[in-house]
Image: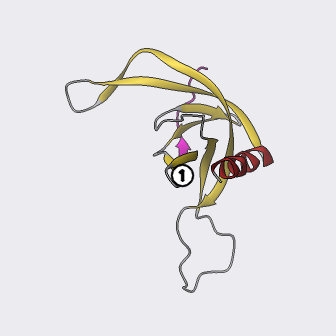
Amino acid sequence: MISQARQGIMAQINANPSRLRFIRLTMVDDGFGDEIPMGDPMKYTAKVRISHESKSVPQLEPKPVGLGTNLARFILADYKTLIHEGDRFTYQGTGWEVGVVDPLSYGSEIVGYQAPIKEAAIMEA
């Protein structure tokens, strides 16, 4: 069953894949309650899926007619791609940063990872 769940994640990724180059900065405490980058950034490439999803659960209440704008972008990665919160990448000419990463599991095994992404400064890959 674990392999089927992992194959399902890969099928979702392969339906609309993007091969992206990620940059991960090593952050350290600056002594004043913030963090600053230290050392050379780690770079890696991964095949993932970028999608639009609803930001919240729809409520049963009257809404104005028209196009809803309650959408956010998410990233979906397989179980071997260890995306981390704060990783950055460029997608379609825009810089993006990975939000809190949610491991997707079946039983006690990880089958993939998903996270919201938000616009960020473009970093050189």
Name the residue beneath numbered marker 1. 105
Residue found farthest to the right: 15
Q: Within 10 Å of the Cα at label 1, are there few (<14), some (14-19), or many (20+) other Cα atoms?
A: some
Can residue 2 be seen? yes
Q: Is residue 19 magenta?
A: no
**67 and 48: which one is in front?**
48
Residue found farthest to the top: 39
Q: Is residue 5 above or below residue 70?
A: above
Task: Give me the residue at 60% from left, 49% from top.
Answer: 74
Residue found farthest to the front: 1
**5 and 43: which one is in front?**
5
Task: Give me the residue at 73% from left, 50% from top.
Answer: 12
**122 and 81: which one is in front?**
81
Residue 65: image location, x then y, percent: 67, 80
Q: Is residue 2 above or below residue 124?
A: below
Can residue 113 be seen? no
Residue 1: image location, x then y, percent: 65, 54
Q: Is residue 5 above or below residue 89?
A: below
Task: Give me the residue at 52% from left, 66% from top.
Answer: 56
Residue 19: image location, x then y, percent: 72, 32
What quarter of the picture does the C terminus occupy?
top right
Please tell me how many numbered marks the rendered image carries.
Answer: 1
- Which quadrant of the figure has residue 119? top right
**101 and 67: which one is in front?**
101
Residue 124: image location, x then y, percent: 59, 20
- Which quadrant of the figure has residue 77? top right
For label 1, the SS is strand
Residue segment shown in magenta = 115-125
Kindly identify the amino acid type of the residue bearing the numbered disc 1: Ser
